[in-house]
Image: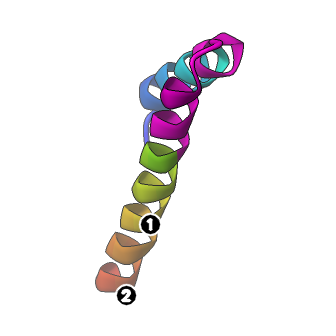
Amino acid sequence: MTWQTINWQWSFAQFALKSDNNLVRINFFSCLMKHRFLLHNSQDIDR
């Protein structure tokens, strides 16, 4: 993960949390969980 993607995710997280739209929040957090899941899987493959 590069700093750019972390910064993008952080700004999107702030936007999602400020948003009144629950769908935006749900979509963001489900994407985040999927992303973490994929990261963990790829690390397992590397080992």
Q: Which residues are magenta?
A: 15-29
Residue labelled with disc 1: 37
Q: Residue 15 appears in which quarter of the rendering?
A: top right
Residue 42 versus residue 14 in the image, above or below = below
Q: Residues within 10 Å of mark 2 (few under 14, many from 20)?
A: few
The C terminus sits in image quarter: bottom left
The residue under the point 63% across, 12% down is 19
Residue 40 versus residue 34 in the image, above or below = below
Q: How is the image coloured?
A: rainbow
Residue 36, percent across and down? Answer: 49, 58
CA separation in Å, label 2 and label 1 = 16 Å
Residue labelled with disc 2: 47
| Residue type, mark 2 in image | Arg
The residue under the point 31% across, 80% down is 46
The residue under the point 33% across, 72% down is 42
- The chief SS type of the magenta part is helix
Numbered tag placed on residue 27 in the rendering: none
Residue 25, percent across and down? Answer: 57, 30
Q: Nearer the viewer, residue 30 or 21?
A: 21
Q: Residue 31 appears in which quarter of the rendering?
A: top left
